[in-house]
Amino acid sequence: MRTMWNAGEKRAANGSAAVRPAALLRKVPSYTTLSGAVAAAQGIEARREGDLTVRTLCNRAD
């Protein structure tokens, strides 16, 4: 898993534009937000523990 933080600078955006296609080709997950990385880590943990469930966004409880 790769997490990439984008500070909004043009140089950072150019770098992320090159990383995303390379990650897709190599089947490496890439997350650009902290919330996305946290959600992915929680999903990995749930799968490892055998406690993975699927819910629609409409039925999501915080």
Image (cartoon, rainbow, N blue to C red):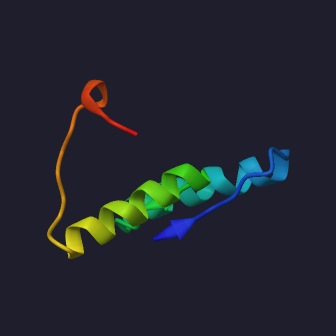
Question: In x, y percent, where is residue 51?
Answer: 17, 64
Q: Is residue 52 left or right of residue 34?
A: left
Residue closer to the observer: 23 or 33 = 33
Residue 5 found in image quarter: bottom right
Give the residue drawn at x 21%, y 38%. Answer: 55
Q: Nearer the viewer, residue 24 or 30?
A: 30
- The image shows residue 18 at horizontal and vertical percentages of 61, 56
Residue at (85% x, 47% y) in the render: 9
Q: Is residue 52 above or below residue 8?
A: below
Left or right, 40 with respect to 13, comes to left
Res. 62 image quadrant: top left
Q: Note whether residue 32 is visible.
A: no
Residue at 31 percent across and 30 percent down: it is 57
Q: Is residue 7 visible?
A: yes
User: To which quarter of the image does residue 10 belong?
Assistant: top right
Q: Position of residue 42 (x, y in %)?
A: 38, 62
Q: Please indicate whether residue 32 sits to the left or right of residue 61 in the image.
A: right
Quadrant showing the N terminus = bottom left
Image-based side of 60 in relation to 35, left or right: left
Q: Check the image and name the residue furthest to the bottom.
A: 48
